């Protein structure tokens, strides 16, 4: 059964998805009608240790696709079509035990240069799917007013009592991936 989350809501994955070993995090979005130019939104994951990003190797995105059980599944340059625009695969058992949070986000590539922001994007979502069964476990639709933001942390996987849980975040950010990453150092 899929859970539709609200901002801040938390889910115990052991309870809601017993036996989950490999998760697919799907991210999707649409460009508002009437906006010209190409929009390239990019999914990313930050592996935090002690709540901090301690290495550039722990930033997973189209330019660094794999680290510690987390794999970026490919860069969609247009966001065209229905469903997930980009995906991140997470092998929960392969994630280093020192990683206490995995932040999942999206930003607009070259947003400042192209004068683009999330006010020009709609239908943004994050969902978590069991890679083995294909079952959608949860989904969070971003409904925040985001006209000035160029990026978002949509959700996070975090450890509590040795088990992974998920939280819908919906935190608007500005900057390119490097500037966003700097916030977590």
Image (cartoon, rainbow, N blue to C red):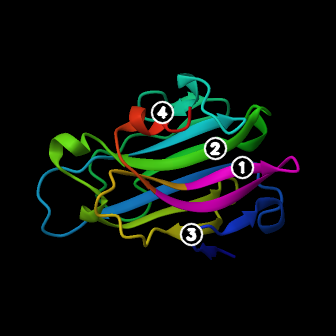
162 on left or right of 90: right
The residue sitting at 60% across, 32% down in the picture is 53
Magenta stretch contains residue 117: no
- The span shown in magenta is 155-171
Q: Is residue 149 above or below residue 96?
A: below
Lower sequence index among marks 3 and 4? 3
The residue beneath circle 4 is 182
Q: Which secondary structure, mark 2?
A: strand
Q: Which secondary structure, mark 1?
A: strand
Q: Which secondary structure, mark 3?
A: loop
The residue sitting at 48% across, 33% down in the picture is 182
On-image quarter of the C terminus = top right
Q: CA distance from mark 4 to mark 2?
A: 15 Å
Label 1 or label 4, whichever lies nearer to me, is: 4
- Quarter of the image holding residue 15? bottom right
State yes or no: discs 1 and 2 in contact (Cβ < 8 Å): yes
How many neighbours does mark 3 have within 10 angstroms: few (below 14), some (14-19), or many (20 or more)?
some
The residue beneath circle 3 is 7
What kind of secondary structure does the magenta stretch mostly adopt? strand
Lower sequence index among marks 3 and 2? 3
48 on left or right of 75: right
How many neighbours does mark 4 have within 10 angstroms: few (below 14), some (14-19), or many (20 or more)?
few
């Amino acid at each position: 059964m899929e859970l539709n989350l609200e901002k801040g809501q938390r889910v115990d994955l052991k309870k809601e998805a017993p036996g989950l070993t490999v998760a697919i995090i799907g991210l999707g979005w649409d460009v508002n009608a009437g906006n010209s130019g190409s929009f390239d939104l990019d999914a990313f994951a930050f592996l935090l240790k002690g709540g901090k990003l301690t290495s550039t190797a722990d930033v997973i995105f189209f330019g660094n696709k794999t680290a510690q059980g987390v794999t970026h599944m490919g860069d969609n340059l247009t966001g065209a079509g229905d469903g997930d625009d980009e995906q991140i695969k997470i092998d929960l058992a392969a994630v280093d035990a020192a990683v206490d949070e995995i932040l999942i986000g999206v930003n607009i590539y070259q947003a400042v240069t192209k004068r683009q922001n999330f006010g020009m994007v709609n239908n943004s979502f994050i969902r978590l799917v069991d890679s083995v069964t294909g079952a959608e476990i949860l989904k969070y639709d971003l409904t925040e007013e985001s006209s000035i933001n160029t990026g978002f942390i949509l959700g996070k996987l975090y450890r509590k009592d040795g088990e992974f849980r998920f939280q819908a975040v919906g935190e608007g950010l500005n900057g390119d991936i490097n500037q966003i990453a700097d916030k977590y150092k």
